[in-house]
Image (spheres, rainbow, N blue to C red):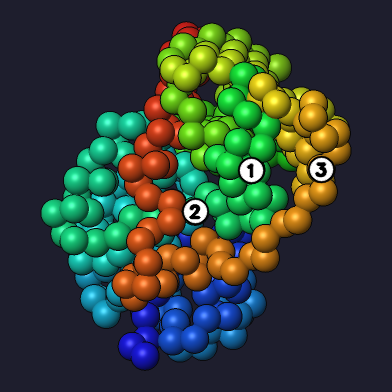
Amino acid sequence: MKTIRIGFIGAGGIAHLHASQMLALEGVEISAVAEPNDQSALNFLTSFGLVNTRRYASHIEMLEDNGLDAVIVCSPHTLHFAQALDVLNAGCHVLIEKPMTCSSQEAEQLIKAAEVRSKLIQVSYQRHFQPEFIYIRQAIADGIIGKLVSVNATLYQDWKSSQAGTWRQNAALSGGGMLMDSGSHIIDVLLWTTGLKPAEVKATLSTHGAPVEIDSFTSIRFEEGAIAALNIVGYVPGYKEFYSFCGELGVIYLENGRIEVLTYKDGSLPVQLPDQTTNQDKSFIDAVRGEHEVMVSGEYARKVIQLTEAIYRSAAYQV
C-alpha cells in the first residue's frame, strides 16, 4: 500500500481531530504542517509525537518543498479559497474544513481548478458520516414519513460568549458570524438529509452588539413545496441541536442525537441506527486511493454556501 503523505495548513483545535483520525489509518503519514503560530505548531507536533514532521511558517513554503499527496486546510474561513487553490495548483488533493469558501464564486473556481488538475476536493461536513443523520436521510428517501411538508433545523449555542475575541468574530477572517461557522453544519444537515432545493429565503439577523451576527432566523420555501425554519441562536447558555422533519405520513425528531419517529398509521416506530464505518478523514483517504467517489464533494458544499449567501442577502447583511 502506497503511503499517503499529508500536509496540514493550520494546527488549531480542529487540526487535532483530523490528525487523530488520520493517524488511525494504515499507510497515512503526516509529513508537514504549516502554522505561523509557534505555540500552536508545537502543541500539534508534541500532542501526536510527530518528531519527523516538517514545520513551516507558511503553506507556500510547505507546498514548494513538494513531497505531499494531499493537504488538509484547517485555517480561518476566509483563507480557505486561496490556500486550497494553492494546494490544487501544487498538484495535491485537498480536504477543506467547513465552510468550503465564503462565496459560491470562490467555490466554483476551486471546483474548476480541481477538474483541470484532476485532483479531489472534499469538504469536512462530518455529519454525513454519523449514524443518526445517515438514518434520517435514508428514512426520508424511503418514504417512511411520506413527502416532506416542513422542516425545523435549530441550533442553540453559547457562541457569542465562547467565541468573543477570537478570529471567529472577526469578519475579515470568519466571513460572517455564527451562521457561517456553526450554522454551516445545520444548513448542511437541512440540505443533505432532505435533498430539497431552496427557492425563496426570508431572514432576520441580530448581532447583539457583537462584531458579527449572532442570531439568525430564516424561513425557506423549497422548489418541491416544503417549507422550513432555520434558527441559529448564539446568545443563549448551553447547547441544543434540534430538528423536526414533518411529512404527509409522519415525523422524525432529532434532539441532541436522540431520534424519535412517529407515523399516523403505526404510531412510534423503532429506530435501528446503522454502524459508523468511516469518517471525514478515512473517506477522503479512501477516495484518494480510488476506492470510492468523494463523499462530500465541492459541488455539494457549494449548495451550502449558496444558501448562506441567500440568507445574508435577504437580511441585507454586509459581512
Q: Residue at x 47, y 66 (%)?
A: 283
Rendering coords of residue 304 (x, y %): 46, 34
Q: Which residue is mark 3?
A: 269
Q: Secondary structure at mark 1?
A: helix
Query: Label 1: how many residues lie within 10 Å, few (<14), some (14-19) or many (20+)?
Result: some
Q: Closer to us: mark 3 or mark 2? A: 3
Please state the horizontal and vertical placement of residue 288, each as a whole percent of the image.
Answer: 34, 70
- Residue 25's tag is none
Give the class, few, some or many, for how many residues have Cα within 10 Å of label 3's Cα (few <14, many ≥20).
few
Q: Residue at x 41, y 41 (%)?
A: 301
Q: Quadrant of residue 149?
A: top right
**Residue at the spot 24% in from the left edge and 76% down from the top edge:** 66
- Residue nearest the observer in this picture, 66 or 272: 272
Q: Amino acid at mark 2?
A: Ser
Report if residue 160 is visible in the image: no
| The residue positioned farthest toward the front in the image shown | 265
Closer-to-camera residue (39/59): 59
Q: How many marks?
A: 3
Q: Nearer the viewer, mark 1 or mark 2?
A: 1
Which of disc 3 and disc 1 is earlier in sequence?
A: 1
Mark 1 and 2 residues: CB-CB less than 8 Å, in contact? Answer: no
- In percent of width and height, residue 15 lies at 55, 63
- Contact between labelled residues 3 and 1, with CB atoms less than 8 Å apart: no
Residue 139's tag is: 1
Point out the tag, 3 or 2, that comes first from the N-terminus: 2
